[in-house]
Image (cartoon, grey):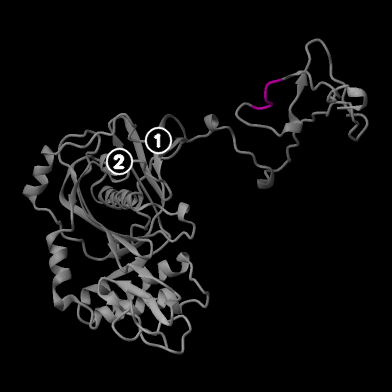
């Protein structure tokens, strides 16, 4: 408010009261200074002849300079509707960071799969067999956790993006140590940062999985089918759970410019063509950037299905059919503490209708590798209240007086041990 109680009216530049004209190019948003203002019946007075900006005069608009020779520095992409790959029918993409709203329920509908709680009996028997265990397994697993959570870094509190991949690598190294006992382990190889592409139809919707995948363990040998022929035929009576009133494609990326392509991510002459196990890491330090366990399990289902479908298309072509030899893909997901296990068996590539033979998913989730880990022990009145590592077997903290971050627990365990 100015002196004397009068109200100050904001000043307006020339032609700021006019009506904005149409954009210079359809589908492209220009910068604010490039927008033209028109007043019917009047021609704007610009500062084009002055060679510099003059307050009160409109900014001039010059035609865009085009180089004589093609120069990538001045390239501008055409509008989407003018691109060669533009299609009138949208395609819904699932990528690495897509989070399905309904989680596993939505992933089962998209992949036309039936869920079976728990892991297959064959894997459970293999895990319970003492001959398949690593020598001193419990102690070596604890040392793997200590290495990732304590010894890998000099920081007071290690970040998840450091210890989560380290725990996975340490556990895989324990599996590699069994090669002298099981020579078939040498017929597998790890592949990182490969891209996958798989296209399929569900009802009248076009879907595609595309982008970076997790770390994949490829094998020279095919995984044998988990379910028998009778169990596969029995899935025809299973009814997929509906997501009404939600759309099954909710949270998926909708595109009109896309290419329909099936690609395993490897060249045709690659020796290790068969997918064995895919490893997914949720190692973001910010909790909101990490997927919840339900969303991680849905992501594991989608990418395990995508790898199996791309492999089936490479073997049997584009024709939809019930596979005589089902394709099995395993998956493991973790955030450094909580583990998810999955086995996916692709029984059919006829995914358009919701009837007929279904695919099968075995899942065992929310398995804790350890319950709690403290880098510094909590001591109250010279007594250790909480030690370094807590698991179902009690306190597994080694006694040490050299490392300042290792709890030196004595006495009857972690709850009442005395600090040195």
* Residue 163 x %, y %: 43, 70
Q: Nearer the viewer, residue 206 or 390?
A: 390
Distance Cα–Cα, label 2 vs label 1: 17 Å
According to the picture, the residue beneath numbered tag 1 turns out to be: 91
Question: In the orientation shown, which residue stands out farthest toward the top?
Answer: 41
Q: Which residue is painted at 43% across and 49% down in the image?
A: 97
Q: Going by the image, does 229 lie left or right of 89?
A: left
Magenta span contains residue 24: yes
In this rendering, is residue 216 above or below 391? above
> Which mark is drawn over residue 106?
2
* Residue 296 x %, y %: 35, 52
Magenta span contains residue 90: no
- Report helix, strand or loop for mark 1: strand
In this rendering, is residue 323 above or below 194? above
Q: Which residues are magenta?
A: 21-25
- Report helix, strand or loop for mark 2: helix
């Amino acid at each position: 408010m100015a002196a004397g109680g009068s109200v100050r009216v904001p000043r307006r530049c020339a032609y700021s009261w006019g009506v904005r004209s149409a954009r210079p190019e359809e589908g492209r948003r220009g910068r604010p200074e490039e927008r033209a203002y028109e007043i019917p019946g009047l021609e704007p007075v610009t500062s084009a002849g002055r060679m510099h900006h003059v307050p009160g005069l409109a900014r001039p608009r010059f035609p865009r300079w085009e180089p004589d020779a093609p120069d990538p520095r001045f390239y501008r992409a055409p509008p989407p509707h003018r691109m060669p790959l533009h299609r009138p029918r949208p395609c819904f993409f699932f990528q690495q960071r897509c989070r399905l709203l309904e989680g596993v329920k939505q992933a089962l509908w998209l992949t036309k799969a039936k869920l079976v709680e728990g892991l297959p009996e064959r894997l459970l028997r293999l895990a319970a067999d003492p001959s398949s265990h690593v020598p001193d397994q419990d102690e070596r697993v604890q040392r793997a956790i200590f290495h990732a959570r304590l010894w890998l870094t000099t920081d007071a509190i290690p970040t998840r993006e450091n210890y989560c991949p380290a725990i996975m690598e340490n556990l895989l190294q324990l599996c590699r140590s069994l090669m002298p006992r099981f020579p078939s382990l040498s017929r597998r190889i790890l592949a990182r940062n490969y891209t996958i592409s798989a296209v399929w139809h569900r009802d009248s919707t076009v879907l595609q999985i595309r982008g970076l995948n997790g770390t994949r363990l490829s094998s020279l040998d095919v995984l044998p089918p988990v379910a028998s022929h009778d169990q596969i035929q029995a899935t025809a009576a299973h009814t997929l759970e509906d997501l009404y009133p939600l759309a099954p494609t909710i949270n998926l990326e909708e595109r009109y410019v896309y290419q329909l392509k099936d690609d395993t991510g490897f060249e045709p002459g690659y020796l290790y063509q068969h997918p064995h196990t895919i490893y997914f890491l949720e190692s973001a330090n910010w909790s909101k950037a990490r997927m919840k366990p339900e969303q991680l399990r849905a992501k594991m289902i989608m990418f395990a299905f995508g790898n199996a479908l791309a492999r089936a298309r490479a073997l049997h072509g584009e024709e939809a059919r019930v596979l005589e030899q089902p394709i099995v893909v395993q998956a493991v997901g973790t955030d450094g503490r909580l583990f998810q296990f999955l086995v996916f068996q692709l029984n059919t590539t006829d995914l358009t209708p919701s009837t007929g033979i279904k695919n099968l998913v075995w899942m065992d989730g929310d398995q804790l590798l350890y319950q709690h880990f403290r880098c510094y022990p909590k001591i109250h009145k010279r007594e250790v209240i909480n030690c370094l590592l807590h698991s179902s077997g009690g306190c597994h903290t080694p006694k040490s007086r050299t490392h300042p971050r290792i709890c030196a627990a004595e006495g009857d365990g972690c709850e009442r041990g005395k600090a040195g």
